[in-house]
Image: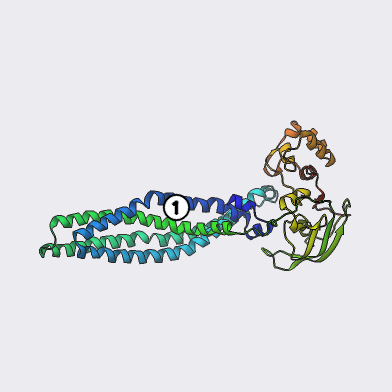
């Protein structure tokens, strides 16, 4: 699943929330894992014990053993009804898990804002509400699943009662011996144990079936963006052409065009600035250059060729983007810089930092370029994060450099 997600384009990821993907890779996978482990332990032993016990009962007395066939049909109908009801509820349960994880993720990632605005009580209430909804659904599902045991006990002990009644009549009629009836009771207990174990499997399968479908949604998702059969592996220069481009977000959006009939031509070596109000499509425009999305109409060209003709990895290596949200990963400053160029020397990293004006604050740190960056870059300021991200992009020595940043012009 993790490898599959790495192949997704932005439009694929837009279909699933971050919390939803996390739930699928943790809770859902664990449910399927538990069901699989239980099946490995029980699925051979229980059916084998059940079949052998039934065979011995039929061998002793065919007519008397027909009681078990009726019981099995009744039990199968009850299990099908229970599973059909609970499967629908478990589908809802795991969607509520997504909501719960989203609440936790949002709270932890924005804990500074929560503290700054004294909204701890509000966040607690929001989490409690999400937990309560999940709790009620689980209780409802488990309440229906709990019917499995009394139904099974009713069927089994009904079999024992019927066996005692008809067995006594058969003994009186001389068609059965007391020893044979006693043996049948022993086999009935084996059948009871087998049915109890099988019912546990059915309960786990009911829960894991909902998880399995959610996992399959990720595994069956086809990446929207793929390489052409014979991709171009070199970009001649950095010129960019938008030829009557229109674009809309199909997943998670309203389907309206974010960009309409954009005709823009930028020469190689030219520096331009694109300004506009929030939500006017600036980020959408630059995302099309490195083919993070595909256009709906028209074409985007880099170096005179349509971006769809290039190998995507090569294209994105040659089109470096500094995004609005500056993301750093846990590791040293050098580790983060080498995201731009994996085998970059320390001198190359220092030069990129000088160009990005990041070397001043790095040199003031006790461990300089070996300074550890916490997850999300929480131990450096917003401006320092941005400069490190710019240095990381410069280290790639790209043909096209895009700085997608927010600024205010007085």
Is residue 81 shown above or below 184?
below
Q: Residue at x 70, y 48 (%)?
A: 116
Kindly tell me whether residue 176 is visible in this rendering: yes
Q: Quadrant of the C terminus?
A: bottom right
Q: Kindly give the residue lying farthest to the top in the view shown.
A: 366
90 or 66: nearer the viewer: 66
Drawn side of residue 334 relative to residue 194, left or right: right
Residue 313 position, x and y percent, is: 72, 50
66 or 386: nearer the viewer: 66
Drawn side of residue 242 relative to residue 38, left or right: right
Q: Find numbered disc 1 in the image and state the secondary structure of the residue it sits on.
A: helix
> Residue at label 1?
35
Q: Residue at x 24, y 55 (%)?
A: 187
* Crowd around label 1: few <14 · some 14–19 · many ≥20 (10 Å): many
Quarter occupied by residue 103: bottom right
Query: How has the structure been colored for display?
Result: rainbow
Residue 360 position, x and y percent, is: 83, 36
Q: Residue at x 85, y 54 (%)?
A: 239
144 or 284: nearer the viewer: 284
Residue 150 position, x and y percent, is: 33, 60
Residue 305 position, x and y percent, is: 80, 57
Kindly tell me whether residue 193 is visible in this rendering: no
Q: How many marks?
A: 1
289 or 84: nearer the viewer: 289
Q: Kindly give the residue lying farthest to the front in the view shown.
A: 230
């Amino acid at each position: 699943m993790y490898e599959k997600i790495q192949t997704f384009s932005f439009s694929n990821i837009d279909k699933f929330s971050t919390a939803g993907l996390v739930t699928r890779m943790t809770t859902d996978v664990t449910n399927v894992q538990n069901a699989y482990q239980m099946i490995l332990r029980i699925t051979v032993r229980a059916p084998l014990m059940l079949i052998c016990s039934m065979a011995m009962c039929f061998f002793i007395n065919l007519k008397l053993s027909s009681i078990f066939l009726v019981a099995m049909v009744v039990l199968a109908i009850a299990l099908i009804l229970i599973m059909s009801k609970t499967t629908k509820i478990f589908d809802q349960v795991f969607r509520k898990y997504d909501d719960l994880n989203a609440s936790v993720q949002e709270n932890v990632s924005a804990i500074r804002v929560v503290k700054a605005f004294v909204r701890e009580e509000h966040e607690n209430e929001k989490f409690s509400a999400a937990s309560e909804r999940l709790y009620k659904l689980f209780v409802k599902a488990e309440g229906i699943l709990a019917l499995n045991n009394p139904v099974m006990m009713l069927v089994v002990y009904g079999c024992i009662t019927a066996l005692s009644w008809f067995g006594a009549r058969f003994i009186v009629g001389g068609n059965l011996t007391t020893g044979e009836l006693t043996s049948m009771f022993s086999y009935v207990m084996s059948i009871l144990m087998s049915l109890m174990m099988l019912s546990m499997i059915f309960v786990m399968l009911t829960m894991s079936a909902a998880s399995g479908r959610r996992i399959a949604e990720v595994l069956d998702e086809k990446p929207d963006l793929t390489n052409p059969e014979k991709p171009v592996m070199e970009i001649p220069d950095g010129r960019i052409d938008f030829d009557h481009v229109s674009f809309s977000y199909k997943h998670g959006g309203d389907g309206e065009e974010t960009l309409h009939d954009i005709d823009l031509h930028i020469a190689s070596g030219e520096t331009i600035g694109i300004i506009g109000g929030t939500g006017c499509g600036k980020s959408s425009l630059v995302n099309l250059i490195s083919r993070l999305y595909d256009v709906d109409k028209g074409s985007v060209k880099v170096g005179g060729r349509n971006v769809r003709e290039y190998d995507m990895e090569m294209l994105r290596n040659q089109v470096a983007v500094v995004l609005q949200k500056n993301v750093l990963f846990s590791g040293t400053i050098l580790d983060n810089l080498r995201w731009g160029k994996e085998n970059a020397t320390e001198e190359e990293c220092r030069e990129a930092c000088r160009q990005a004006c990041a070397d001043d604050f790095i040199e003031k740190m006790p461990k300089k370029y070996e300074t550890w960056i916490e997850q999300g870059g929480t131990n450096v300021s917003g401006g320092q994060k941005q400069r490190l991200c710019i240095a990381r992009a410069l280290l790639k020595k790209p043909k096209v450099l895009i700085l997608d940043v927010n600024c205010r012009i007085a």
